[in-house]
Image (cartoon, coloured by chain):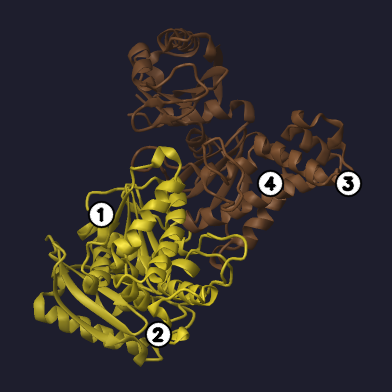
Chain colours: A brown, B yellow
Amino acid sequence: MDKPYAIGIDVGGTNTVAGIVDKRGQIILSGSIKTGKHPNVEDYLDELTNLLNDLIEKTATKDQIKGIGAGTPNGNYFTGSIEFAPNLPWKGVIPFAQMLEDRVGIPVALTNDANAAAIGEMTYGAARGMKDFIVITLGTGVGSGIVVNGQLVYGHDGFAGELGHVIVRRQNGRLCGCGRAGCLEAYSSATGMARTAREYLELKPDVNTRLRDIPIDDITSKDVFDAAMEGDEMAKDIFKFTGNMLGEAFADFVAFSSPEAIILFGGLSKAGELIMDPIRESMEKNMLPIYRDKVKLMFSELKESDAAVLGASALGWEVK
Amino acid sequence: MDKPYAIGIDVGGTNTVAGIVDKRGQIILSGSIKTGKHPNVEDYLDELTNLLNDLIEKTATKDQIKGIGAGTPNGNYFTGSIEFAPNLPWKGVIPFAQMLEDRVGIPVALTNDANAAAIGEMTYGAARGMKDFIVITLGTGVGSGIVVNGQLVYGHDGFAGELGHVIVRRQNGRLCGCGRAGCLEAYSSATGMARTAREYLELKPDVNTRLRDIPIDDITSKDVFDAAMEGDEMAKDIFKFTGNMLGEAFADFVAFSSPEAIILFGGLSKAGELIMDPIRESMEKNMLPIYRDKVKLMFSELKESDAAVLGASALGWEVK
């Protein structure tokens, strides 16, 4: 029987959201639990299993579910485990896929959030019909999901696609949460952008900007966005700086896999042309001539509130 | 019938070498013609066809040849064409694969030299059994062939894998033949290394080195190698500088595809530990912690004089 549904689960630091999804990428029914409520992963999985059984009962039968896909922090596709995730309450290596499968009786596959986003774009979003593209997730951090020849790039150990941690500044680079310096993420994440704002405010004390109305340590990328939308020049310069870093890095990514498109996903991508214009200019300027004017820059076409669940569900269609 | 032979053709700027290869990677018979002799590509292909017919006649029958693979400068696998190759006498786009196939009556596939090297390593060399690895060719330039999930990465247009042209120095980078500045190739090719030697000699006039015995504009990477082998400190420092650049770049490549191995191929790789030690040190130091101590650094296992023909022949097995 051709099974009409897949389940997508987005395991976030705060909430875990699960949804039943049909083949056109419609979420039929969804629900959520608190990720941090249970210090013991067994208790968490019991509550998640109750949620899934409830969702299934209200919409379908277990036989109609092709598979379950989960997008999790530090999720390893090859092992089905969550490995040393700093933002989750369970330490060490958690064999998440197997534990959930044992409880629900439906096959489970797992990957990290950015890879789930890439599969989601390929299945339901901006990358439909593409065989070579890169999804860059711009949020608290910078993540990536890379597709080559129609397949997600996992690498030999399942850890491929950490493009937030290529080095964009070799001298005097900003310290990064990974322990190194000069990573793309230290400049082009939402937190990196807030850092740029603080640097600009300190280095340019004479420039008039409404960003000075906010206590300097409280400034967020949202504040910079709001200011830029009202025409604030410093805020616009901060977007240019951020986009320039991304464009430089993208030019090198293109030399690696020559993708048809690079797709922006996540919070910062809501800034629209404010971020896209400087990325495009910098990418084209820094690219090897044979690639110029050939790589599409696009925004995700998945509705943001649904994107994580849809991305994870897309993996559910592929579970064996 | 299971066809026992493939033909490999290496189209170089000076010579074109062709060989009949068996399944174990033995070259049964080979021959060559001068690439530059014919300003007209039709004449060149006629002579190449005569060579191939001669090789086939002496060893086998046409029916026993599975296919012909060619490694050429600027070869595009998707189109089967040589596109704007600066070092060949024929300008513009040459539909090489089709033109040769029409003459010989055996299917022909074509790719660039570095991709041919990667397929060669996977079929007969250091990458047998690997599904994720990168071959870096260190010669006059720096090229690359990337394998992900057992397949060569061609990208959406056939031009993926120009890792000699990622930017390793964003400020005051060396000018590169591609028209940009700071490319890996400008530092880590044989010519880049000779350039480093000239810079060191000028910047360090007080350092005693046998490299000063050579007219400065004549210094080659071979001279640096010879001096380093005799213990010359400046020559060893030049290898350290070159290897350091490669290691920094490799650390970023690993963040992309998390390969099981990076394999060095071509002239400079003959320097052995002189080049490998600083690469390894720099790569490990610059890598994201999750990748450390996991990526093998290896030398090509194809005999150098045969490598290009073997690599090309490996493509011949896959021709459809």
Residue assigned mark 2: B213
Q: Amino acid at mark 4?
A: Thr
Q: Badge 1 is on which residue?
A: B127
Chain identifier of the residue bearing label 2 in the image: B
Q: What is the C-alpha distance between the residues marked 3 and 1?
A: 59 Å
- CB under 8 Å between discs 3 and 1: no
- Please, what is the three-letter code of the amino acid marked with disc 3? Asp
Q: Earlier in the sequence, mark 1 or mark 2?
A: 1
Q: State whether discs 4 and 2 lie on one chain.
A: no
* Residue named by callout 3: A206
Residue B220 at least partly seen: no
Q: Are marks 3 and 4 in contact (CB under 8 Å)?
A: no
Secondary structure category for the residue under label 2: helix
Upstream in the sequence, badge 3 or badge 4?
3
Using residue B95 as the reference point, say whether residue B306 is left or right of it: left
Among all residues in the image, which is located at the extreme left?
A: B59
* Residue carrying label 4: A242
Q: Quick check: do tags 1 and 4 share a chain?
A: no
Please determine whether, in this image, residue A5 is positioned above or below residue A163. Answer: above
Q: Residues within 10 Å of mark 2 (few under 14, many from 20)?
A: few
The percent position of residue B295, horizontal first and vertical second, equals 34, 47
Label 1 to label 2: alpha-carbon separation: 41 Å
Labels 3, 2: front one: 2
Q: Residue at x 41, y 43 (%)?
A: A153
Residue A113 visible in the displayed image:
yes
The residue located at (39%, 31%) in the rendering is A76
The percent position of residue B187, horizontal first and vertical second, equals 48, 67
Image quadrant occupied by the N terminus of chain A: top left
Chain under disc 4: A
